[in-house]
Image: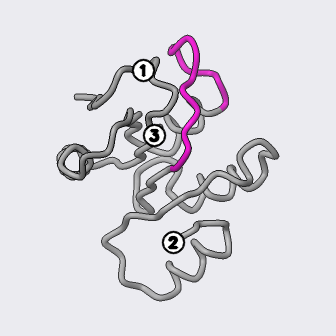
């Protein structure tokens, strides 16, 4: 279930794109976001394919709500987080989008690769 903590027309509200295949992780992220006291809108996508479709303006949603920050899982079916990072880096409009990787991976090479592909953290 998508989580909205503010009116979509609120221009001052943060716009966050959450890309994670785990429904439980998306739920917990929403709970933490609400408890933090931040106002904003969370746009949830279940995998990299869905996220890219949304960002490219190809989804059924009429007008994409452009994110200010993206939280991205690395290990997903379909296009994984690395592939999403690579796609974002190839799109001039999204090269400055702040992407924070959320992952259960503790592999240092995953961290290095994500940063090389443009992840902020």
Q: Nearer the viewer, mark 1 or mark 2?
A: 1
The residues bearing labels 1 and 2 have C-alpha atoms spaced at a distance of 27 Å
Mark number displayed over residue 14: 3
Rendered location of residue 24, percent (x, y) = 17, 48
Is residue 63 rendered to the left or right of residue 88?
Answer: left
Residue at x 42% of width, y 20% of height? 8
Residue at x 68% of width, y 58% of height? 86
**Color scheme of the displayed model:** one colour
Give the mark nearer the N terminus: 1 vs 2.
1
Name the residue carrying label 2: 121
Question: Which residues make up the magenta segment?
Answer: 56-69
Query: Within the magenta stretch, is there residue 63?
Result: yes
**SS assignment at label 3:** strand
Answer whether residue 25 is visible to the viewer in this image.
no
Mark number displayed over residue 8: 1
- The quarter of the image holding the N terminus is top left
């Amino acid at each position: 279930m998508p989580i909205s903590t503010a009116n979509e027309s609120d221009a001052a509200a943060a716009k966050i794109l959450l890309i994670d295949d785990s429904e439980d992780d998306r739920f917990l992220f929403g709970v933490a976001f609400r408890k933090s006291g931040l106002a904003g809108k969370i746009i949830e996508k279940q995998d990299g394919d869905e996220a890219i479709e949304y960002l490219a303006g190809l989804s059924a949603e009429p007008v994409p709500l452009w994110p200010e920050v993206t939280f991205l899982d690395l290990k997903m079916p379909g296009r994984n987080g690395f592939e999403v990072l690579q796609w974002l880096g190839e799109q001039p409009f999204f090269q400055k989008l702040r992407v924070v990787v959320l992952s259960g991976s503790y592999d240092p090479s995953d961290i290095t690769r994500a940063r090389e592909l443009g992840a902020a953290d």
